Amino acid sequence: MTAPEDKLGTLDELAGECEHWRRRGETAVLVNGAFDMLHVGHLRYLAGAREHADHLVAAVNSDASVRASKGDARPILPEDERVEILSHLWMVDRICLFDDLTVGPVLAALKPDVHAKGTDYTVDTVPEREVVAAYGGRTVICGDPKEHATTDLIGIILERFGRQ
């Protein structure tokens, strides 16, 4: 088993590892997201994704990528802390950071057997589904209903403590 501090890798390193797993007849699932202020929805998504393959790779949006998609107030936690938290979860085997607005380039490089997205998507609405299909992978939806979100947590914190 990989030690938590060894789970972060470059895209090239992880591409080699995914190919090694394929040669051994093992499968990989890729999840992606900011994973800012880790909450139970994240855990259920990760655990659900892990059920679809032997290994789970988490592609984590870099700070710049999160700011570009969610605005200058995000992320709350910097990328190194988000990676460190994920690295201690049993279901996460490997982690990579990415700067793009979509995870398409990561999927194209790693070619995981499965790309797992949360329940705020359907298979037909996953933006990268065609990238995955092009190399023969499949897209799955997993996790609990989208009842947990970092944005909602921020709202609760501001409501309870921000106006004192």
Image (cartoon, grey):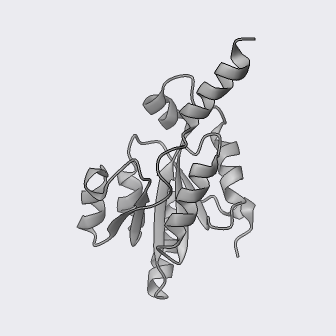
- Identify the residue shown where x is 51% and y is 44%: 147
Q: Is residue 13 visible?
A: no
How many numbered marks, from 0 up? Answer: 0
Which image quadrant: the C terminus?
A: top right
- The residue at the far bottom in this view is 24
- Identify the residue shown where x is 49% and y is 83%: 26
Query: Considering depth in this image, is 88 or 62 the residue closer to the camera?
Result: 88
- Identify the residue shown where x is 65% and y is 20%: 159
Query: Considering depth in this image, is 5 or 71 the residue closer to the camera?
Result: 71
> With respect to residue 151, does 91 lie above or below?
below
| In this rendering, position of residue 15 left or right of residue 91 | left
- Identify the residue shown where x is 70% and y is 22%: 160
Query: Considering depth in this image, is 152 or 54 the residue closer to the camera?
Result: 152
- Position of residue 102 measured from the top left corner of the image (x, y, whole percent): 38, 45
- Position of residue 96 measured from the top left corner of the image (x, y, whole percent): 55, 55
Res. 56 image quadrant:
bottom right
- Position of residue 109 measured from the top left corner of the image (x, y, whole percent): 39, 62
Res. 58 image quadrant:
bottom right
Q: Is residue 119 visible?
A: yes
> With respect to residue 161, does 121 lie above or below?
below
- Position of residue 90 measured from the top left corner of the image (x, y, whole percent): 68, 67
Which image quadrant: the N terminus?
A: bottom right
